[in-house]
Image (tube, rainbow, N blue to C red):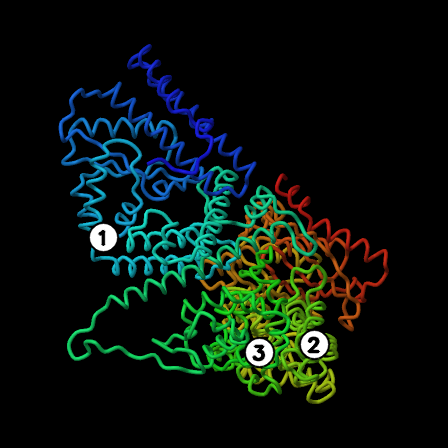
């Protein structure tokens, strides 16, 4: 009845001594002893918890022992309370048949798996309609438990009511499945158990399996449907404790097993798999206990700040190229992955069992569909099965062939065969890795025409992928400790390969029209697939993963069967896989020097085509919402400008011709207002005409004309722009020093995030400032109230109606989780990236109105900002400014650059943020 495996029970709680203390208190003080009794119970509970916390600190991975200990502590308290209530408060010398009570532990408590702040789930069972005595006892016990500050989930039912409700409700049926008698009437408990198996469970096994799996799938969907999300829910997430519990529930319901160990006896798991089950469960339980102790509450989401703390408590240490927290999370994901493979094998066995029990009637009675044979494999029910236990031992290359055949033929791999592949993956040695047939099969699978993502994921689950490509094995289950990446490196890579396949099949044409159009033109599609596989292969090794990855590519590509030209292309793509996204997001694409430098690095249309497709799938595979129309627009502009330059071999046209062509295009857009191009256009320098897109210029000219007609000193126009995935905010105002930082502050105060800004001054003394703004979720602001707030924010900031600094400091950051990360601010200067401007790039922790503070520092340093480009990477932000001094010249003097760097570092620092918050 009591949880087993709990050593040193009396050090946790001494029930007899506690019962004697309570009896003495009652005898001495009678009814007035309640307060003293509750205190005695509370002290025993506190001491027990302290002892269990101490044990967890000494043995930080002892999940089963510690959760069993918390369950034991709760059992003993319940028994003492029950005995006190029935002996001292409501004694009945000769109880009637109705005056019987059984106290059951259900849920996690029933399994003896309680974390420090888990709810205490108990069921009070009575034989028939509750007698007054039963009601009094139950109520008195609950009041004492509540006085102890315990969270109690309780139900109180008769045996008949329990049976009726269990038939109707899956949750109640599952809870009863784990019901364990804590104290009370043993005979009543046995009656309940017998009736449950006879009246509820019998004949409903298949229904229970179906419902439980549907419940699991719905839960996974809610939690992100991947076991590789970087802030996993340890209880309800994919590969978490609930998945292991689901296996046990199903096994118990179908086979009547009493504990997980008996799953081996009934053939659902091998002894090896059961050991994996126990190891994963023990680790997850230990992690959950640490989380509860750190937070002081029932916390199940392993957030970034908790990951650091739990890794430290579980004694994970830093290693070269990999921090303690990354090592801890890699181990966590390996356990979650193991839970996934156990689930597949387990359910396949049950499926086969139920299939054998199914009987055919009528015409098809006695007829069964014979499996067909394909390349030596059995194909049955759309699943590929190895013909025998020694299939892979006879030829280990078949471990690669299995998944290639599955992908090419659109078949699933039978979980029993997955089990064999998992067992025999160790047969893959250097000889198999060098085998030409094995590498050709792998390349066919990687660049498969149907669904390489799914087949590669199976291959990874079975442990074959990491054995065949050891470099990939090194990033298996490896997380990147930041808020930008949503998945582990292996999951990100497999998703990217899947996205590449979808683009090739035309399934993502709406989001990626250019990539869909260009992919059919690449010279070697297999080289592109290998580049996607290898682009992050060297993460976690210390050093630049792009440079290290290019070295891996030079070594691996010839092994895979790629020729020298393909190998050089793959290595170049891996080395430069971040070039296009960095250029597009951090540089001014209207500056000719940006395109010149990019083209000088790319050098050929073939490289450009491959790089553009790799960049798109890499960004999109980072996680949901990472790809958006603004990034698509920027990459498209860079691609088109670079393609034109590569085709012509020189600049398309000179500055004067470009300005003239832009003016003609704007005049066409303006229609009857085309005269504004000459009337107002003369006030604007060539740099404005080159920098701004035609539609924005047309909008600016109309806005300026209307403002002058109305004699307005300040004009603000806001318009959601679906193409750019942001809201355009165009401000025309009399120019004065500090205009940019004030506008940025006003937009931030109104709840907007600036992602791009261009600042121009007309000869009339008016500033034309064009911003692209998104909300906190990366979407355009379109509601009337949002637009009104932005206009008011800018107006108030420019007219000094609001104190920007304290207001901005008080604004909460949308991602307060960023505090879990160390982001040391960095400032870089580049006087070669532009012919006319000094380019300053600041990387810092994302925080309220970082752009405003940096812009203010630049203003104080007597610099003019001509454009700003803002890129968010989770907890970090990279803000790029194109600046000149007050004479319009670049900033080159070393002492001047040092001054500016110090001012920007101070503005970006955490210390500065704390000072502002305190002010």
Q: Nearer the viewer, mark 2 or mark 3?
A: 3
Give the side of residue 191 with respect to residue 729, left or right.
left
Mark 2 sits on what residue? 572
Q: Position of residue 308 (x, y in %)?
A: 59, 47
Q: Nearer the viewer, mark 3 or mark 1?
A: 3
Q: How many C-alpha atoms fall within 10 Å of the one at disc 1: few (<14), some, or many (≥20)?
A: some
Residue 499 vertical position relative to residue 885 in the rendered view, above or below: below
Q: Position of residue 817 (x, y in %)?
A: 55, 49
Give the side of residue 10 with respect to residue 485, left or right.
left
Going by the picture, which residue comes out furthest to the bottom? Answer: 648
Q: Secondary structure at mark 3?
A: helix
N-terminal of the two: label 3 or label 1? 1
Q: Nearer the viewer, mark 2 or mark 1?
A: 1
Mark 3 sits on what residue? 438
Mark 1 sits on what residue? 201
Q: CA distance from mark 2 to mark 3?
A: 25 Å
Where, quadrant-wise, is the C terminus in this rendering?
A: top right
Q: Position of residue 609 (x, y in %)?
A: 62, 82
Where is residue 88, by image quadrant? top left
Q: Residue at x 44, y 55 (%)?
A: 271
Q: Residue at x 72, y 68 (%)?
A: 547
Residue 593 vertical position relative to residue 671 in the rendered view, above or below: above
Please state which of residues 392 and 301 is positioned toward the viewer in this rendering: 392
């Amino acid at each position: 009845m009591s949880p087993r495996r709990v050593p040193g029970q009396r050090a946790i709680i001494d029930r007899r001594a506690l019962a004697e203390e309570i009896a003495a208190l009652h005898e001495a003080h009678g009814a007035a002893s309640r307060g003293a009794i509750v205190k005695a119970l509370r002290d025993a509970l506190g001491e027990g918890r302290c002892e269990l916390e101490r044990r967890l600190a000494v043995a930080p991975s002892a999940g089963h022992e510690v959760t069993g200990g918390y369950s034991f502590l709760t059992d003993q308290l319940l028994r003492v309370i029950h005995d006190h209530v029935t002996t001292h408060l409501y004694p009945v010398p000769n109880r009637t048949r109705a005056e019987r009570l059984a106290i059951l532990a259900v849920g996690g408590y029933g399994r003896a798996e309680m974390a420090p702040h888990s709810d205490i789930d108990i069921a009070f069972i009575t034989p028939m309609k509750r007698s007054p005595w039963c009601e009094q006892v139950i109520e008195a016990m609950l009041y004492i438990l509540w006085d102890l500050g315990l969270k109690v989930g309780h139900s109180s039912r008769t045996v008949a009511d329990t049976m009726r409700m269990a038939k109707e409700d899956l949750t109640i049926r599952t809870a009863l499945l784990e019901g364990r008698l804590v104290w009370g009437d043993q005979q009543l408990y046995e009656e309940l158990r017998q009736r449950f198996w006879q009246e509820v469970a019998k004949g409903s096994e298949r229904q229970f399996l179906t419902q439980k799996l549907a419940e699991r799938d719905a839960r996974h969907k809610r939690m992100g449907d991947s076991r590789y999300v970087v802030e996993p829910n340890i209880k309800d997430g994919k590969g978490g404790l609930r998945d292991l519990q689901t296996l046990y529930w199903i096994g118990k319901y179908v086979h009547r097993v009493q504990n997980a160990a008996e799953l081996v006896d009934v053939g659902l798991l091998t002894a090896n798999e059961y050991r994996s089950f126990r190891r994963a469960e023990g680790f997850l339980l230990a992690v959950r206990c640490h989380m509860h102790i750190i937070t002081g509450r029932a916390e199940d989401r392993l957030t970034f700040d908790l990951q650091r703390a739990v890794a430290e408590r579980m004694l994970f240490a830093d290693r070269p190229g990999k921090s303690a927290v990354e090592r801890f999370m890699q181990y966590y994901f390996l356990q979650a992955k193991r839970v996934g493979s156990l689930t597949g094998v387990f359910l396949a066995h049950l499926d086969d069992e139920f299939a054998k029990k199914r009987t055919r009637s009528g015409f098809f009675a006695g007829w069964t569909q014979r499996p067909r044979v394909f390349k030596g494999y059995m194909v049955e029910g759309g699943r590929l099965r190895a013909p025998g236990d020694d299939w892979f031992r006879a030829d280990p290359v078949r471990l690669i062939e299995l998944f290639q055949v599955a992908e090419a033929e659109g078949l699933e791999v039978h979980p029993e065969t997955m089990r064999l592949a998992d067992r025999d993956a160790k047969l893959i040695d250097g000889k198999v890795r060098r085998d030409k047939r094995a590498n050709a099969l792998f390349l066919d699978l990687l660049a498969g025409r149907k669904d390489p993502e799914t087949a590669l994921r199976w291959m990874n689950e079975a442990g074959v992928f990491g054995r065949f490509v050891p470099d990939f094995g090194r990033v298996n289950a490896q997380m990147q400790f930041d808020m930008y990446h949503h998945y582990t490196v292996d999951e990100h890579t497999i998703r990217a390969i899947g996205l590449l396949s979808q683009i090739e099949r035309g399934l993502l044409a709406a989001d990626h029209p250019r990539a869909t159009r260009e992919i059919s033109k690449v010279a070697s599609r297999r080289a592109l697939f290998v580049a996607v596989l290898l682009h992050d292969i060297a993460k976690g090794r210390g050093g630049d993963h792009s440079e290290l990855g290019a070295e891996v590519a030079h070594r691996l590509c010839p092994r895979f069967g790629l020729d020298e030209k393909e190998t050089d292309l793959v290595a170049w793509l891996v080395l430069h896989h971040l070039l296009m996204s960095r250029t597009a997001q951090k540089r001014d694409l209207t500056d000719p020097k940006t395109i010149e430098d990019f083209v000088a690095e790319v050098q050929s249309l073939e490289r450009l085509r491959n790089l553009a497709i790799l960049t798109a799938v890499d960004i999109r595979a980072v996680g949901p919402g990472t790809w958006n129309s603004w990034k698509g627009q920027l990459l498209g502009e860079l691609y088109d400008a670079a393609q034109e330059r590569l085709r012509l071999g020189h600049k398309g046209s000179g500055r004067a011709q470009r300005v003239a062509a832009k003016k003609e295009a704007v005049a066409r857009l303006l229609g009857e207002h085309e005269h504004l191009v000459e009337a107002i256009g003369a006030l604007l320098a060539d740099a404005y005409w080159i920098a701004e897109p035609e539609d924005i210029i047309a909008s600016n000219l109309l806005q300026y004309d209307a403002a002058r007609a109305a004699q307005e000193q300040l004009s603000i126009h806001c318009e959601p722009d679906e193409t750019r995935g942001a809201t355009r905010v165009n401000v025309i105002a009399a120019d004065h020093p500090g205009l940019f930082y004030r506008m940025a502050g006003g937009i931030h105060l109104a709840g907007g995030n600036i992602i791009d800004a261009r600042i121009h001054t007309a000869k009339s003394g008016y500033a034309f400032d064009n911003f692209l703004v998104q909300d906190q979720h990366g979407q355009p602001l379109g509601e009337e109230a949002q637009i009104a707030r932005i206009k008011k924010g800018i107006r108030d900031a420019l007219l000094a109606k609001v104190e920007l600094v304290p207001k901005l400091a008080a604004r909460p950051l949308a991602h307060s989780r960023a505090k879990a990360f160390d982001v040391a601010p960095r400032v870089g200067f580049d006087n070669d990236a532009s012919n006319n401007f000094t380019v300053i790039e600041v990387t810092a922790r994302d925080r309220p109105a970082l752009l405003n503070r940096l812009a203010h520092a630049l203003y104080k340093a007597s610099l003019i900002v001509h454009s700003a480009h803002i890129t968010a990477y989770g907890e970090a932000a990279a803000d790029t400014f194109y600046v000149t001094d007050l004479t319009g010249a670049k900033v080159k003097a070393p002492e001047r650059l040092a001054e500016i760097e110090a001012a920007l570092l101070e503005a970006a620092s955490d210390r500065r943020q704390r000072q502002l918050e305190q002010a």
